[in-house]
Image: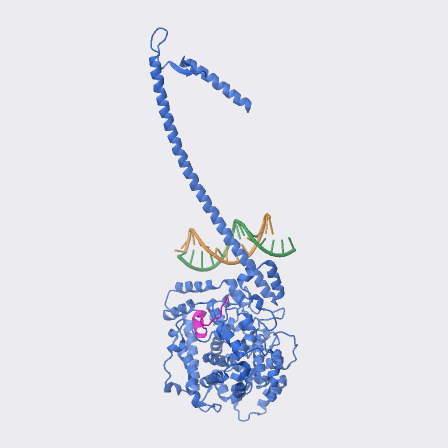
Chain colours: A blue, B orange, C green
Amino acid sequence: MKFLKPWWSDGGGLLHLTVLLGLAGLHRDPGRDRDRGRDLYPLRDELLLWGRPSPASAPSPFPAPGGWGRADPPHPKGREPEPAGRLLRAVRALGAPFIPRTRVDAWLVHGVAAGDPDGAHGLLGAAAASAAGGVGAGADGGSQAALGGGGDPRAAPSSPLAAGEEEAAPAEPTARVPDAGGRASQENGALRATGHSSQQEEKEQGVSAQDNSLQQQDEGEAEAADAPESRNERYINGTDTSLSLEDLLQLLSSQPENSLEGISLGDIPLLPGSINDGLNSSAYYNVNFSQAISHDVNLHEAMLLCPDNAFRRDPAGRTSQSQEPFLQLHSHTTNPPQLLPGTNLTAFLPPVDHQTRSVTSHDLLCDLDINIFDEINSMSLVTDFNPMEVSPLFGEPDSDSGLSLNSSHNSTSVTNSNSCVCDSAIGSSSDLESLSHPALEGAVGGYYPEPSKICHIDLSSDSFHGDLAFQHIFHNHTYHLQSSVPEAISESFSWPGKPQKMKSRYLNDTDRNLSRDERRAQALHIPFSVDEIVHMPVDSFNSMLSRYYLTDLQVSLIRDIRRRGKNKVAAQNCRKRKLDIILNLEDDVCNLQAKKETLKSERAQCNKAINIMKKKLHNLYRDILSRLRDDEGRPVNPNQYTLQCSQDGSVLVVPKELMTSNYKKEAQKGKRKSETRN
DNA sequence: GGGCCCTGTCATAGG
DNA sequence: ACCCTATGACAGGGC
């Protein structure tokens, strides 16, 4: 599958899912999330819970407390999985020419439609963060604000407003991620210093500017703005997160060009104010931004343009392209049976005719709305929200995505402050078990990014090149979930009436790809593989725990994984040993039985030989005795006499009565001797 | 539905 | 005291 998955691999599917959630009104309460310090993690919880059998009763489908590995891992040590880097890449990747545009579409929609208060789930949210702190205040800073806000609300503000506050607040130069917005303001100071001073100043004004935003609305700053626009601005400012689809349309259509550019490109560091700026700055990232921008703008046009849209700069040149992304999405959403594994979605796209292209963005969005809800319904109908059936809608489980669930495991590369365990945007779950559903893992982040490649973003380094980052983002994709996932998905879609057993077996097969501990480790974003954790020498293990900045929850999980892993191996060895013992005992029994039979046969043969010898001896006696004569010349009766051989070789004819008496005496003597010896 | 088998996990003992 | 290993017991899932 060529769409949606790889670049924010674990977030892409989620983001798209959250689009559905947002459109379905299932997004969480922003205030609650902010209070609880939740970031992107609970969204995944929501997704999973949303698909659970009985989430309907819960307007806010949060998992009930309790259970293993409950979510909201407190990050007692103040370190949290760092989504900023990943999302920053995602934002930057928007400028990449090879970004699947539908992803951006979804992300754009998601940021608003999902009502994401963090401003981290969509570019609109990012733009909102930028707008809150000053839209043009350095695109990177804006994106970082949004990213930081979304990255970890525990340490960074959750809402765009808070992000702006954090942006304005002085940050410790040595502080790690928590102050993502602050770091953004610092690390990207140079960027911001390159221009856009007015926007930067506005952003640096931080809280005051944000606080003034509402006042400015009330004061009729935009007198021409109607009520929806005011609401949209409130949303941008993070004060109103309950945008409906209509509000989204209004917002999108009402945004001035710069704002929209800020939404799409302004978050890209080199595109703070306009596309032209980004073009001028393209050398900085070694990216063909003209193409990238073209794609990005096309996204907006595909998604957002209205017939009377004023910010349409090159309609003629973009009309054809602008519709394609959405058409892809549209086609995708309306043709779920076409979601065959390993197929490029575009291959199934109907030819884009002029009639199709003539539809308005509103129509497209309406179609999107309908299609999304259709997908929601179809997904919920197939199973109790089988994430694997959803994953193809948002993810790219085939190998083309390339993010390997086992690809990281490079513990040595996960260290410094710039490197980060940054796939954590989807973060800890309230239910690690369910969270770690393999299919959803494949869709929303079941992978360990190799930190040195994926997560290492040195914002202050000139050596950073966007294309390099893009390569990391787009080309390091080797999923642990292989093609079996889409195959099964395809089967599931093609034959929904298949026995549940098949599905369960399939699920089990996919589960085998990731053990429970592996899923748990992924859920907590432990930067080590289970194999490493289990088989690492104790010294290395302890040094690892002390060297890396791990939360107590992570440490606990790592120790549990190690204990369970070792015990599992021990149990396997024990059973194998026990089985070997049993098999050996069985072999021994067989051998002994065979030996017993052999001895029996030998005994029988011996007895037979003895009997033959006895018979021969008897015949010999009779023959000899028949030839003997007594003193009177009479033949000796064999029944009364017998032969006795003496030690000197002489043979005597002895009456049997005497032999028996002597024999008894000899026997008694021998018995006495044996008794005296004992 | 019950039984069997396999596997993972836990608790515990011992080295 | 800590870690590792071994093993009995239990539970869950598949057949």
**Is A394 situated above or below A637?**
below
Q: Quick one: A254 or A188, which is closer to the camera?
A: A188
Residue A654 quadrant? top left
Q: Quick one: A552 or A281, which is closer to the camera?
A: A281
Q: Quadrant of the N terminus of chain A?
A: bottom left
Residue at x 60%, y 84% (from the top left corner)? A192
Magenta part mainly helix, strand or loop?
loop
Residue with the most extreme bottom position: A224
* Number of on-image labels: 0
Q: Left or right: A84 with respect to A591?
A: right
Find residue A424 and report its horizontal and vertical position in percent.
55, 71
Residue at x 60%, y 58% (from the top left corner)? A538
Is A396 in the magenta?
A: yes
Q: Left or right: A509 with respect to A162?
A: left
Residue at x 42%, y 64% (from the top left corner)? A506
Residue with the most extreme top position: A632
Find residue A541 and report its horizontal and vertical position in percent.
59, 61
Q: Left or right: C9 with respect to A509?
A: right
Find residue A112 and report its horizontal and vertical position in percent.
51, 81
Find residue A517 and report its horizontal and vertical position in percent.
52, 62
**Is B2 situated above or below A630?**
below
Can residue A386 be seen by looking at this rendering?
no
Is A393 in the magenta?
A: yes
Q: Quadrant of the C terminus of chain A?
A: top right
Can residue A568 be seen by looking at this rendering?
yes
**Is A385 situated above or below A582?**
below
Q: Quick one: A120 or A215, which is closer to the camera?
A: A120
Give the magenta part as a residue range: A387-406
